[in-house]
Amino acid sequence: MKVLDINNLYSPTGGGIRTYHHEKLQWCTDNGIENFLIYPASGDTRSKLNGGTVIGVRSPRLANSGYNFFTRGQPIRDLIEEIRPDVIELGSGIVVPKMIREYLEEIPSFAFYHSNWPEALPLSVLRIRRGPFHGVFKRIATPRMERGYEPLRAVMGASEYSLRRLREAGISNPIKVQLGAHPETFRPDRRSEALRRELAGAEGGKIAIYIGRLAPEKGIHVLLKAFEKLFNQGNIVTVVAGGGHYTRRLERASAGSPDKLKLVGRVTSREKAAELMASADAFISAGPCDTFSLVTLEALNCGTPVVACREAASSELVEQAGGDTIYTPWYSGDAWQGPSPGPLTPLWKTDEVQGVRRETHLGPLLLPDNGYIRPVLLTGSQGGKYEILHLCDHHTAGFRPGHGG
């Protein structure tokens, strides 16, 4: 059996989408299925990865997004003729469906909703945040997404957020296929006291960490606006791991407050990412239109409290872990002018090995135009016991803190 993935959102240096495809390539290999992945690249390439075949099609850069974008359908059609797949899976409903529509009607075809592109594209490419033009773009783009998915057997999404967006676009048959993280890699005992001292100093400061692309659609502007307040919190160090559009602005901010903002660059190792997450006191998931946020699940697996954006799918993961959030990135109006929302619920961090409960107060983080981020009880305090949840049949186990037996 041959399965062909075509994804104009894949990048060899990407995040969750990259992980999705690399895991799928391995799973298909382990189960006797030939998996091919076609993506837009800076040049024509072909290589073996995890037993499958990854094919880059020369395509132009998409503005300053860090991605390339399919503009020619013929190379993709030629590859379909060469591979002759039994199943096609699309990574998005933009551009590609029109290029290969005749094949989608002949070959059983599906799509995975990796990106809420009617909302993400204005942020990532046009640098437009929520406003009148953003709404106009969404109203124009959404029907195009519906037409792109029309010839497919089904469209899959990893969260209720994704399914809602698909139904709003007129997709009547979305299927929920949850994803997950590797519990053997992302776990609480990855915590490193040596790394904490390196990042926060010997005085025992608290660490808030962000790991991911430094792109507009990831909510980095929220972090930038929060830094002034964060820097005034004497014991909080913000650690940012990643690269992208906002790198220079973050470098300037770090140069002005090197003890408050630490930039560690892109993290290419899962083990290193797990060590950073488990060693932090809070993880920031700021993206306003993430369709799943694998990195949020990985942080929760490490037992680390997550401050998530309510508008995106990451909030579902936080709620499933027993937490809540009041961070709303777009609709909370101007600067929060009212009184303080009262004492914060502490963040608890449980060490799975020692079963020791540590209380972490990060204090109110006032965002100039987004209200308060209120950290609340996100991780369990029952002796560090965790229940394993099998979310799917492969590479999909996650921890639910606070529900141990």
Image: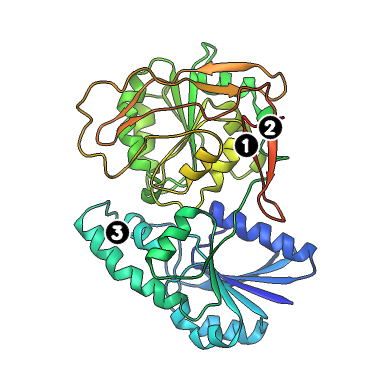
Tell me the CA gap for discs 1 and 2. Answer: 6 Å
Q: Using residue 91 as the reference point, say whether residue 48 is left or right of it.
A: right
Question: Looking at the picture, which amino acid does disc 3 mark?
Answer: Leu
Looking at marks 1 and 2 on the same chain, the residue that comes earlier in the sequence is marked by 2
Residue 13 visible in the current orientation: no
In the rendered view of the protein, which quadrant contains the N terminus? bottom right
Q: Using residue 163 as the reference point, say whether residue 26 is left or right of it.
A: right
Question: Looking at the picture, which amino acid does disc 1 mark?
Answer: Arg
Position in image of residue 240 (x %, y %): 47, 35
For label 1, the residue is: 400
Which class describes the residues within 10 Å of circle 1: few (<14), some (14-19), or many (20+)?
many
Looking at marks 3 and 2 on the same chain, the residue that comes earlier in the sequence is marked by 3
Instruction: Report the mark closest to the observer, 3 or 2.
Output: 2
Looking at marks 3 and 1 on the same chain, the residue that comes earlier in the sequence is marked by 3
In the rendered view of the protein, which quadrant contains the C terminus? top right
For label 2, the residue is: 386
Q: At 55% across and 52% down in the image, what residue appears?
A: 16
Q: Quadrant of residue 286?
A: top left
The circle drawn on residue 126 is: 3
Question: Looking at the picture, which amino acid does disc 2 mark?
Answer: Tyr
Numbered disc 3: secondary structure: loop
The circle drawn on residue 117 is: none
Residue 11 visible in the current orientation: yes
Tell me the CA gap for discs 3 and 1. Answer: 38 Å
Residues tagged 3 and 2 counted as in contact (Cβ below 8 A): no
Find the residue positioned furthest to the top: 203
Residues tagged 1 and 2 counted as in contact (Cβ below 8 A): yes
Viewer-closest of 187 and 327: 327
